[in-house]
Image (cartoon, grey):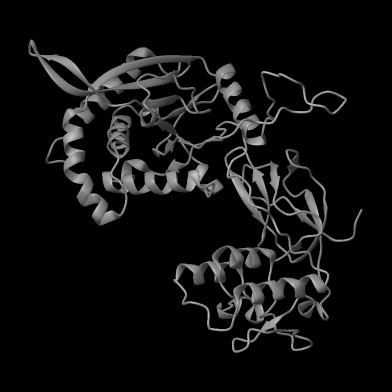
Amino acid sequence: MSKGTAVNVPHLAESLVSATIGKWLKQPGDYIEQYDVLCELITDKVTVEMPSPIEGTLVELLVKDGDTAAVGAPICLIAEPQAAGASNAVAAAISPASGAVEAVGNSGSMRGRYSPAVLRLASEHGISLDQVQGTGFEGRITRKDVEAYVASGPAKQPAGVSVETVNTAAAEAAADAGVFIPNTPPVPVRSSGLHMSQTPAVPNVEKTGQPLEGRSEYLMDVSPIRNLIATRMRQSVSEIPHAWTMIEVDVTNLVMLRNKLKDEFLRKEGINLTYLAFVIKAVVNAIKDYPIINSVWAVDKIIVKRDINISLVVGTEDSVVTPVIKKADQKNIAGLAREIDDLTRRGRAGKLTLEDMQGGTFTVNNTGSFGSILSYPIINYPQAVNFTFESIVKRPVVIQDMIAVRSMVNLCLSLDHRILDGVICGRFLQRVKENLEAYNQETKLY
């Protein structure tokens, strides 16, 4: 085994016993700054980025992409720099006046020691690192320093100082010291093949290594996150006896209310006021009246949850995540709208934490956002129901023997028939319907 310090799978949550390596972001030979992201860890809840707890050169990967390791198990080895002279091995001091790069020597300053992440950010944003104030150890410039400098809208480079000259010189100094600075070419944001913008290459599947001519299909590897989703869905369907019901709701008053408030809300809060915030408020108020809906099957007993924590289904092009709005019954409509916006943005950006994903008791799925008018959702195990809010459509409706054009929506509910029956779920949906139809021009957001 190569010499180096073992980096182990961290204990991210109390219930976590293992994690899968989704993708290594660093490779053997890369120089790793402390807190640089090593890889993506896929747990049973969420995909998280794993930062390096130490600094040094990555010498060996002990766990491959797609493999699972127990909490506390080593996944890679990093050779830490020697204490003496280590800080000078990659150093390059930049003179703001001349733009020249000088070796630090024995000064001990870490100002000019740049990680691959820092150099890459500087190159992407066209900034000279001599203008960035370092907040790291002994003045070292970190990735956060560069991001903060970019966000602050830095001034133009001083005359005579070339960004390419300064940053390239720093990278060359690092290379001369034996540190590999990767020059990663741009790659597509997604490569799952689920949303292809070009015709995929035909895989070489024959032993000859030649592509099959005229092949009418192509192959995709099952990603770890897709495999995890498949496992969870199979568990839900095999263990929970699903039943399904639906109700139609007139949300004309809700549409008028949202249209009245959305522009002012956007100016005040900086986020969109969606229908989902009103829907979740109607749902949590109905759960208060029928708490058995907020329960879990436990073989010899039914556990009814006191806290109403709404699991919000957020779909990306590659997967589905369910971040949780904690104690949703204690929030007003504006508070729910803020939570929805925050969790949705971070979910699609892959920035959710394990804490964001834990504790859900009831799942709400806004399938209407992509035009669905009817769906049969699979229950988010081990919860008792999965509720979907479908697309709002205008339809002719008979009201007091007269035909009127109204904004109508379907509410769908999959239920665990071990815990719930049609009567209680029908009453629950009726209460949600009453709450939605009770919205009017006087409804307050705060």
Residue 16 placed where, x, y %? 64, 42
Residue 363 is left or right of residue 75, and the answer is left
- Answer above or below: position of 198 versus 246: below
Snapshot quadrant of residue 94: bottom right
Residue 224 placed where, x, y %? 67, 35
Residue 112 placed where, x, y %? 68, 79
- Answer above or below: position of 4 versus 203: below
Snapshot quadrant of residue 279: top left
Residue 13, visible in the rendered structure = no
At horizontal 44% and vertical 71% (from top left) the residue drawn is 153
Residue 35, visible in the rendered structure = yes
Q: Nearer the viewer, residue 304 or 225?
A: 225
Residue 167 placed where, x, y %? 65, 73
Q: Nearer the viewer, residue 350 or 312?
A: 350
Residue furthest to the top in view is 401
Residue 32 is left or right of residue 272, and the answer is right
